[in-house]
Image: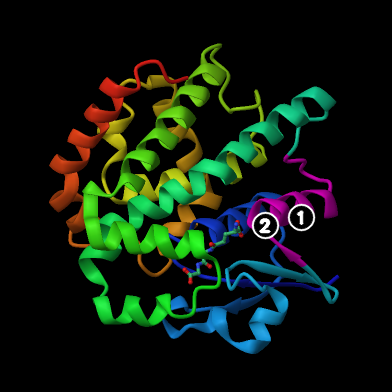
Amino acid sequence: MALELYYLEETDSICSNRVVVTLSEKGITDWVPHKMILMNRDQFTPEYLKLNPNGTVPTLVHDGSVIRESSLICSYIDALRPDPPLSPSDLVERYHMAEFIKLFDERGFAATGIINFVTKFRLTIPRDKLEERWKHIPVIDRLHRQQSVIREGLDSLYVLRAIGAWETIFRRMEAALADGRPYLMGDRFTLAETNSATFVKVIEMIRFLDFWLEPYPKTREWWDRVSSRPSMQQLDTFDSNAVSEDSPHAKAGRECEAGFRKKIEEYREQFAHAL
Ligand SMILES: N[C@@H](CCC(=O)N[C@@H](CS)C(=O)NCC(=O)O)C(=O)O
């Protein structure tokens, strides 16, 4: 079996890392890496666009068949090699896990990108580089999201939406973990973790996680448990890690913290009714 992965090997590459963590948890090490660099616009070469017309990373190629979309790639890998299973055996539980993953895909992904863009990207990447990259983005939603947060900063409405997405996710996680279970689906680490932990990692890299999780103690414990697994710890050995207090993420986080906290307060006041 030949598994080839087109991916980014950077600590804040949330979708690629979903797959990297899944491969590690499955104990699969014999995959062929094709490292991509977004700033070199590797995602827009004609050869890559044939594999992935969205111009996004990651893409998995298995014996010549192409599998796209990070959460689907993770499910594919789980199905490919059954042990250890990363899905519950119970049918209803499997669909409850899929509901979580749908929420992470539909709201968590964009929200995490927005938080990374409005902090680290906004403060470190030269505007002309971003303008050049924007000329090639083939999906208009992604283009508008990036342009709005880069141009308007924390005042972009996308930032409040991103906060809303994470407030919903944290509330749902807290509810799932309320009975004392260690992982979202029960006793075992599953795809619900591989599909969310790399997103939460970025919030931690920016140093926003400690204050954000204050009202969510069970989710805090969950994060401590999940982030200490070797599959997650390896992410800190990649480029763009935020281990040092001098890293771009840590610096951008310090610069934006006060404004971001105000936005969380604003959201919590306006949306106390949210579930
Ligand atoms: N829904 C896709 C999203 C993938 C995605 O957008 N990846 C980002 C990197 S995290 C990317 O390739 N961005 C390309 C760009 O910004 O030009 C998935 O889950 O695989």
Q: Which residues are magenta?
A: 67-86
Name the residue that disc number 2 marks: 23
Q: Residues within 10 Å of mark 2 (few under 14, many from 20)?
A: some
Q: Residues within 10 Å of mark 1 (few under 14, many from 20)?
A: many
Asked if residue 5 lies left or right of residue 263, the reply is right
CB of residue at label 2: within 8 Å of ligand 1?
A: no
Camera-nearest residue between 193 and 151:
151
Are circles 2 and 1 on residues that touch, CB within 8 Å? Answer: yes
Asked if residue 67 lies left or right of residue 195, the reply is right
Q: How is the image coloured?
A: rainbow
Mark 2, secondary structure of its residue: helix
Q: Quadrant of ligand 1?
A: bottom right
| Label 2, label 1: how far apart the Cα atoms are | 7 Å
> What is the x, y in percent for residue 53?
66, 74
* Residue 5 numbered tag: none
Who's the residue at 85% across and 74% down the image? 63
> What is the x, y in percent for residue 194?
60, 45
Asked if residue 12 lies left or right of residue 193, the reply is left
Q: Where 159 sits versus 18, above or below? A: above
Q: Nearer the viewer, mark 2 or mark 1?
A: 1
Q: Is residue 114 visible?
A: yes
Who's the residue at 67% across and 87% down the image? 47
Task: Mark 2 or mark 1: name the one nearer the start of the chain.
Answer: 2
Farthest residue to the top: give it.
179
The N terminus: image quadrant: bottom right
For badge 1, the amino acid type reads Ile
Who's the residue at 67% across and 58% down the image? 69
Name the residue that disc number 1 marks: 77
For badge 2, the amino acid type reads Leu
Camera-nearest residue between 84 and 114:
114
For residue 95, which quarter of the picture? top right
Residue 79 drawn in magenta: yes
